[in-house]
Image (cartoon, rainbow, N blue to C red):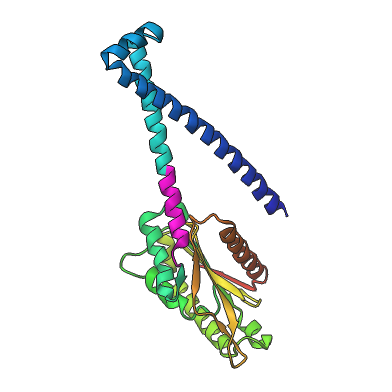
């Protein structure tokens, strides 16, 4: 409820700022047009004489003032054009298909952040299932020739005991989760000193709740979210895609997805039974 009230106030402030901006644009545009018309008419001898007699005679100070007005309008116009371009880019981003079937494409975001993002954006929270497909890709990235630095990585993996006792999750997931967690611990033990040298922190958390919602939340604001589904045989299996919610998408729909993922991430954290840091 508090979030809804906060967003309502934000919407009201946005509407007010929009009205103020429109008034400002109208005033500056009108001044620019009047100034331009005056300067044009001032170049024509008959109209210049009329203007000098009934309006004003241009001197150095008046000319400077008019030039200043035109410069101000030009700066405002350029700024507004830039905002419109950014807004259009965001709209196009939202309109593009944001469905990823290839996990490697999802993890490409790590390299994007490493090369284009700020250091403060070098974080990723992975709410996974058994991490059986995610960890090999992530381990290869961590130990690649161009080794990443200054990263904080949080891994959530299903608790094998919870899987075995759930009665709904596939039984083989328990073995996969156990083996993958062991591989993670082994790499953190073998590469721990090197990771600390590069300021890379890896936290492994084993959680005990049904992972209906899972995915990746990156420090640059990008979210990749997926779900569990029922197979025709009656068992549970992962859905076949991740949907990307780009950081530029601030729509109500995108914010609801962010709240949904955050809700499940908090639930996984609350049920964590193990925390291994490297």
Which quarter of the image is occupied by the N terminus?
A: bottom right
Q: Position of residue 20 (x, y in %)?
A: 56, 34
Residue with the most extreme top position: 53
Q: Is residue 25 left or right of residue 56?
A: right
Q: Position of residue 5 (x, y in %)?
A: 70, 49
Q: Position of residue 213 (x, y in %)?
A: 60, 73
Q: Nearer the viewer, residue 230 or 69?
A: 69
Q: Is residue 172 magenta?
A: no
Q: Nearer the viewer, residue 152 or 223?
A: 223
Q: Please report the bounds of the magenta region as a residue range.
A: 83-97
Asked whether residue 86 appears in the rendered view, the answer is yes
Q: Position of residue 208 (x, y in %)?
A: 65, 76
Image position of 100 with respect to 82: above or below:
below
Residue positioned 43% across, 69% down in the render: 106
Residue positioned 60% across, 66% down in the render: 261
Q: Nearer the viewer, residue 249 or 117?
A: 249
What's the magenta bit mostly, secondary-structure-wise? helix
Give the quarter of the image for residue 67: top left
Q: Nearer the viewer, residue 133 or 260?
A: 260
Residue positioned 32% across, 14% down in the render: 47
Q: Is residue 41 left or right of residue 242?
A: left
Image position of 220 with respect to 243: above or below:
above
Asked whether residue 205 appears in the rendered view, the answer is no
Give the quarter of the image for residue 90: bottom left
């Amino acid at each position: 409820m508090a979030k809804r009230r906060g967003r309502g106030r934000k919407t009201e402030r946005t509407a007010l700022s929009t009205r103020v901006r429109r008034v400002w644009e109208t005033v500056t545009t009108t001044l620019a047009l009047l100034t331009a018309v005056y300067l044009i008419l001032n170049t024509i001898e008959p109209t210049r004489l009329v203007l000098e007699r009934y309006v004003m005679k241009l001197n150095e100070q008046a000319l400077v003032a008019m030039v200043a007005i035109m410069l101000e309008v030009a700066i405002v116009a350029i700024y507004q054009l830039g905002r419109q371009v950014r807004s259009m880019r965001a709209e196009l981003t939202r309109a593009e298909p944001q469905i990823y079937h290839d996990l490697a494409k999802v993890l490409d975001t790590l390299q994007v952040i490493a090369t284009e993002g700020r250091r403060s954006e070098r974080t990723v929270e992975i709410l996974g299932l058994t991490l059986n497909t995610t960890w090999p890709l992530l381990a290869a990235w961590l130990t690649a020739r161009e080794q990443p630095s200054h990263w904080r990585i949080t891994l959530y993996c299903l608790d094998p005991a919870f899987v075995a006792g759930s009665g709904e999750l596939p039984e083989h997931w328990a073995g996969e989760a156990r083996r993958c967690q062991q591989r993670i611990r082994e790499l953190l033990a073998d590469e721990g000193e090197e990771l600390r040298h590069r300021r890379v922190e890896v936290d492994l958390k084993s959680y005990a709740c049904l992972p209906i919602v899972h995915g990746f939340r990156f420090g640059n604001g990008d979210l990749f979210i997926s779900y569990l589904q029922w197979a025709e045989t009656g068992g549970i299996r992962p859905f076949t895609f991740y949907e990307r919610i780009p950081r530029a998408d601030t729509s109500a729909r995108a914010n609801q997805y962010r709240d949904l993922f955050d809700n499940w991430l908090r639930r996984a954290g609350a049920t964590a039974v193990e925390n291994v840091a490297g």
